[in-house]
Amino acid sequence: MGHQEYLDREKARQAATEIMQHLNPIAKDQQLLIDAIGMEHRTLQQRFTELCRLWLLHCAVSCYGRDGRNEASHQLGKKLKPLLERYPLPYI
């Protein structure tokens, strides 16, 4: 792995950690996060939606590590997979 790839992976890991830290305390009112995302630039909203699409596709794979806490994510991903595969979102 090259130096740039390492930096990119580290940056992605840090971003994922920050997102997950935000999800924990606001679990009772996720609408706050949704409203905040809705106020972001339209291109960023589009990229976020594409990230959600890709995440659900990731959840759908049979080797997705799961237990009772995330089994519903796997099942939803499997059901949505045919539709999600047909509609990748463009970067505008």
Image (cartoon, helix red, strand yellow):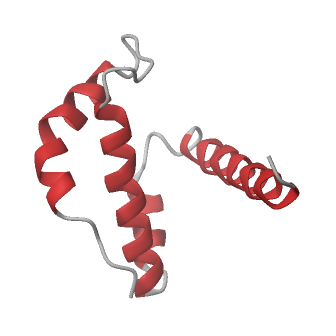
* Residue 76, x across and y down, in percent: 20, 34
> Up-down: is 39 above or below 68?
below
Report the front residue among 28 and 92. 92
Is residue 13 left or right of 88 when viewed as pictured?
right
Q: Residue at (47%, 78%) from the top-left corner?
A: 44
Is residue 84 left or right of 39 when viewed as pictured?
left
Furthest-top residue in view? 67
Q: Residue at (82%, 61%) from the top-left corner?
A: 4
> Up-down: is 62 above or below 37?
above
* Residue 26, x across and y down, in percent: 52, 46
Q: Residue at (21%, 26%) from the top-left corner?
A: 75
> Up-down: is 53 above or below 50?
above
Is residue 83 left or right of 37 when viewed as pictured?
left
Furthest-front residue in view? 1
* Residue 71, x across and y down, in percent: 31, 19
Furthest-right residue in view? 3
Q: How many marks?
A: 0
Q: Residue at (32%, 29%) from the top-left corner?
A: 61
Q: Quadrant of residue 15?
A: bottom right
Classify the position of the C terminus by image quarter.
Answer: bottom left
Q: Quadrant of residue 57?
A: top left
* Residue 10, x across and y down, in percent: 78, 50
